[in-house]
Image (spheres, rainbow, N blue to C red):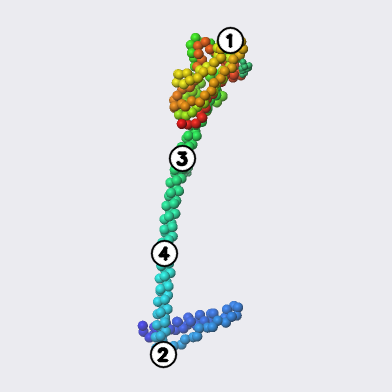
Amino acid sequence: MTTTKAVLLLLLWTGLASAESGGSHEDSAGAAIAPLPPRHPNSLPEMQEMLIEMRGELAKQKAEIRLAKAQVEEELEKLKRKNKELELKLEAVEDNNADLNNTLKQLQNINEESKVAFSVSFSVSSDIHIGPHDTDITLGFNHVFSNIGNAYSVRSGIFTAPVRGVYQFQYHIFAGGSHGAGAKLMKNGEQVAAAYNHKAPHDINTSQGLSLLLEKGDEVSLLLEAGWWVAAYQGHLTTFSGQLLFLM
Ligand SMILES: *[C@@H]1O[C@H](CO)[C@@H](O)[C@H](O)[C@H]1NC(C)=O
Ligand SMILES: *[C@@H]1O[C@H](CO)[C@@H](O)[C@H](O)[C@H]1NC(C)=O
């Protein structure tokens, strides 16, 4: 370092020092703070001593800056790690969300296909009887109270299970007493159960109800045997109902 440069630096140094001490000479509360004693180096050795001090100060500041930088970098690393963690968590939440969406969709489908229920009777303009016939016939109920899921066919009088499940069926038969009255519950053309009353000197009421495990496509209907009859009255005294209880 040349002497002129050193002198300039020194001037700067002492200027700063006095500015500092001047600025904080008295605070607003009036408490006096001892000013730094102004330094006016008079000799080269003194100047050299001050330069050495300044170097020391610089080195200290450099070390402090390095430390601060290291701390900032460490903090940044921590934040990056935390960010990565959060990204992974978010991905997991999104995956879970997609799974839940699928489950929800499946449950919605199940809920939709579980809506199966019908109740039917005869639509007539006057009170009549159906039968007795020479042969067995399927009772063609043509008055629809409800037919959720459209599994009962008015055209054929047959209920076709839309899904595998447990279904409950009920029927009630009303008839005059002049003939045997009743009906058989048929599954795929086979008798499962029957409700019957012999010919009697009065009106007849008979009923039946049961739960059946049905495969998709199984057919259930009521059969009127040859020689039997059932009333088809306007008051709907003869009815046939079925409901899906639950899927299997
Ligand atoms: C889940 O479904 C909702 C609505 O159907 C949709 O807005 C969302 O993007 C879906 N989420 C995923 C992760 O598939
Ligand atoms: C059968 O039920 C009907 C009403 O649904 C009733 O009028 C009739 O008296 C009942 N018959 C007998 C024998 O109980």
Q: Residues within 10 Å of mark 4 (few under 14, many from 20)?
A: few
Picture residue at 42% right of the left edge, 70% below the top: 67
In the image, which disc is placed on residue 43? 2
Query: Disc 1, disc 4: CB below 8 Å?
Result: no
Dot 4: what SS? helix
Q: Amino acid at mark 1?
A: Ser
Q: Foreground mark, 4 or 2?
A: 4
Q: Amino acid at mark 3?
A: Thr
Q: Point out residue 109 in the picture as x, y percentages from the top left corner.
A: 47, 35
**Which residue occupies the foreground of this view, 181 or 6?**
181
* Residue that badge 3 annotates: 103
Residue extending farthest to the left is: 1
Q: With respect to residue 76, does 60 lie above or below?
A: below
Q: Foreground mark, 1 or 4?
A: 1
Q: Residues within 10 Å of mark 1 (few under 14, many from 20)?
A: some
Query: Disc 1, disc 2: CB below 8 Å?
Result: no
Which badge, 4 or 3, comes first in the chain's sequence? 4
Q: Residues within 10 Å of mark 3 (few under 14, many from 20)?
A: few
Which badge, 1 or 3, comes first in the chain's sequence? 3
Picture residue at 48% right of the left edge, 22% below the top: 220
Picture residue at 49% right of the left edge, 33% below the top: 112
Which badge, 1 or 4, comes first in the chain's sequence? 4
Task: Quote the CA–CA distance across marks 4 and 2.
Answer: 47 Å
Which badge, 4 or 2, comes first in the chain's sequence? 2
Dot 3: what SS? helix
